Amino acid sequence: MRATDLTLPRTARELAADIYRTTRDPGFASDGTLRLELRDRATTILTSLSAGYEYHDAGALLEALTGSAATAAALESLLDLAVDAELIAPAVSAGLRERVADLKRQIAQARRAVLRYRALGAAGPGDRPG
């Protein structure tokens, strides 16, 4: 099974694809920088989550989840900016922001699960001393 087959990375992949489709709109031709920033944040979330699951280490996964949540917050801000710059319609942004919010909820849920796992004293390969 690939990491992108898991629910959280799959959600991130679908969001990234939606961002790519949205930023193909001709309105983004006038602002290539914002288009690239949106795509970069969406791609970073996807790749960070996928890599985090591949480490098979609770600490590394927790770090990937935390970083992905922060990047998702940045993506929300960029979507707001795209509306303010009149590059996308508010309704389009609202739909994408809803997808980001769902992803952030999934990330928070996964973080709680990893923290519970670590609190139980379960040691992954990277959590073992020495």
Image (spheres, grey):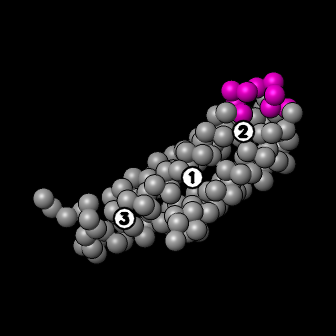
Percent x, y for residue 93?
78, 46
Examine the image and state in which quarter residue 90 appears. Answer: top right
Sooner in the amino-acid sequence: mark 2 or mark 1: 1
Q: Which residue appears at 53% of the width and 50% of the height?
A: 47
Q: Which residue appears at 66% of the width and 40% of the height?
A: 39
Q: Amino acid at mark 1?
A: Leu
Q: With 82 as the anchor, is 119 left or right in this view?
A: left
* Range of residues picked out in magenta: 27-35
* Count of numbered badges drawn on the protein: 3
How many C-alpha atoms fall within 10 Å of the one at disc 2: few (<14), some, or many (≥20)? some
Q: Is residue 32 above or below residue 129?
A: above
Q: Which residue appears at 57% of the width and 52% of the height?
A: 46
Q: Disc 1 designates what residue? A: 46
Percent x, y for residue 80?
72, 38
Q: Is residue 65 magenta?
A: no
Sooner in the amino-acid sequence: mark 3 or mark 1: 1
Q: Amino acid at mark 3?
A: His
Residue mark closest to the camera, 3 vs 2: 3
How many C-alpha atoms fall within 10 Å of the one at disc 3: few (<14), some, or many (≥20)? few
How many C-alpha atoms fall within 10 Å of the one at disc 1: few (<14), some, or many (≥20)? many
Q: With 73 as the anchor, is 118 left or right in this view?
A: left
Depth check: 72 or 14 in front?
14
